[in-house]
Amino acid sequence: MTAQQVSGQSAASPTEAGDGHGRRLINATAVMASGTMISRALGLVRAIMIAFILGNGTMQAGVLSLALTVPSSLYLLLAGGTLNNVLVPQIVRAVNHDDDGGKAFVDRIMTGFLIIMGALTIIFTIAAPVVMSIYTSATWRTPEMAEQWRSLLLMSYITMPQVFFYGVFFLIGQVLNAREKFGPMMWAPIANNVVAIASLGVYLAVWGVQTASGQTFTDQQAWLLGIGSTVGIIAQTVILVPYLRRAGFHYRPRFDLRGTGLGRTFHVARWMVGFVALTSLAQVVVTNLASGGTVTTGDIGGAWNAYQNAYLIWILPHSLLTVSLATAMLPTASRFAQADNLSGVAAETGRALRLALTFLVPSSVAFVVLANPITRVPFGNGAGASDYHYVAWALMAFGLGLIPFTIQYLYLRAFYSLDNTKTPFLLQIWISGANAVLAVGLAWASTDAATLAARLALAYSLSYFLGAGLTHFALRKRLPALDGRGMVTHVGKLLLASAPAAAAAWLITWLAAGSASVWLRLAVLVGAGLVAVLLFFFTAKRLGIPEAASLLNILRRRQPDDHRHPHPDRSRPARTDHRRPPDRQDCCRHRRHHQPEVRQCGHRREGEAVLHLCRHRSEALHRGADRQDAGRCRRAGIHHRRHRHRLRTRAAAVPGALRRLRHGRVVPRQWYARADHL
């Protein structure tokens, strides 16, 4: 799509453009969210199995969590931000303006990044002891912790090659996203979780539940869990290759990196590398503090594992909706930015933000109010039955920051669409600095290791309250059309709609809190969730929140404009004429109110047209009107496949003459058609 086409689209009516982009954004989000939901659910199953087998606060749970965290953290430090947020606008620009559709540009990018990622992965694997020393406290390297330290290093050597495969996975995924193929990247992690769950199942079958807090892994156990994790990352990467070919892209290594425009890409990426480096440094501080809690508290410990489990639940709604919305929003916002349509960028950002907050605000309230029953069901069984409340306290602290985190996350994507990565870097200095300083202060404020994870989570949430405010004021300078007051009003309405839902859910779970059956607790939690959802949407509808209705329409698999127009007399029951067959009664009722089913036509030659259809058997009275209306329909451009398919589908249910419908004919003789030009 060229800049002229984008300009032409932006010249359309605001309602028309907004509805089109909104439907496309929601549909793309639904595809991605479905895959992410399954993947995250399987990831939660993996965490549940770890808590059941190893517990939430044991030394083994801390070792496994650290070994799996460091490779992903290193990937984010090296290339994660560059691949996820910088290359999409660059690839979109190459696809739109290069003669070969950007193939040579993408080939060079992939070649350069694969070489760099491969070299760095080898370096970090060899230097695993140094890397793990940075991420853990000094207590791990004391003589009494020698066996635990050796076990951690062995598992780190096995999992460190994941850095390279993380890079390949996200590189291929961003190429697919730039071509608007959003689904595969969200569905592929399912394979990773399946492999990890299988390895944990083998562990449980062979060694059973481990309850001793200070027990270390044997070499066989470390090899099994480490290989299972690494093979899962490889599997999710390999799955994307066929989709890349199906999208029409065939990778060919190219080493002519000079004079190809890649210098500008790396010039833009330097700020993103700094941005991710700041985030990773803050994570190193938090990991170091939490790992110290895991070691020094013996059988209580587990601060880092509890922190990770709470984060896993907290990030679930964000992964299901916000990430999918941002992924679908970024290419469209980038096109608007290339056409200098700043109002379009602001509208796309606001649309994605309002849709995300419609689900994230109730989730935030639920995490604060229902943290105990939410965490008890997955993490309160087996070895984790005695320490699941550490996860609950951390989830409450995380829940406070879900709203500002969502706002700041989507605002950053607006900056990336504007090809601006310097401002997010400067803003991240404040966020990461506040997170690190608050984490150190709150960790030192108390020696109670049971609340350490909650204090670190609270530091994380407070830092994003600061970040959301600073980011909004910075983005408002670039996008004057950004509606901050409307966003605050929207959040206030959502909080008001969530209050009765949260109160009802809390009361239901409180009444069943004493139950010892995990299945009963699960049933009560699901029932409370259903009641809360119904109350939320009921209240949201009464408060006039349109995004809630849009999301319900997607769940019902219908478009927002596929509805019957309201009529003043619709609330009154229709009078039945027993002398007529049912179809003639319906037809006459439609004709009397002029409110038959409506389908918006895709053509707008003579104004926006709608086609009114209903059956009628009084040919003698309406034959002339049929001919006139059929001609009006043809002149209005109603010859559209969707309408013909609609007619064929409905005609198939009517015997006799209606089955004589042929291709190109708009209205059969025994159908009453009426075209109204709006």
Image: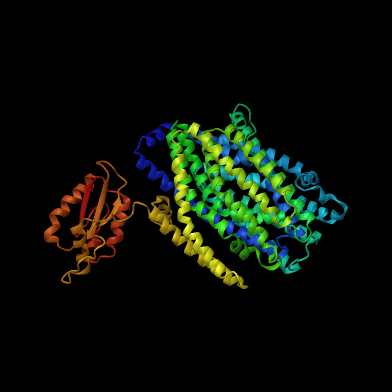
Image quadrant in which the N terminus is located = top left
Left or right: 290 as drawn, with respect to 553: right
Q: Position of residue 545 (x, y in %)?
A: 41, 51
Q: In front: 148, or 225?
A: 148
Q: In front: 619, or 35?
A: 35
| Vertical comparison of 309 with 468: above or below | below
Left or right: 337 as drawn, with respect to 304: left
Number of numbered markers? 0
Residue farthest to the right? Answer: 143
| Vertical comparison of 22 with 103: above or below | below
Q: In front: 487, or 425?
A: 487
Q: Is residue 391 visible?
A: yes
Residue farthest to the left? Answer: 620
In the rendered image, which quarter is residue 617 located in? bottom left
Left or right: 273 as drawn, with respect to 211: left
Image quadrant in which the C terminus is located = top left
Q: Where is residue 181 in the image (x, y as percent from the top left)?
A: 51, 47
In the rendered image, which quarter is residue 42 located in? bottom right
Q: Where is residue 247 in the image (x, y as percent from the top left)?
A: 51, 45
| Residue drawn at point x = 43 percent, y = 37 percent | 344
Q: Where is residue 340 in the image (x, y as percent from the top left)?
A: 45, 30
Residue farthest to the top? Answer: 259
- The colour mode here is rainbow
Q: Can residue 188 be seen in this view?
A: no
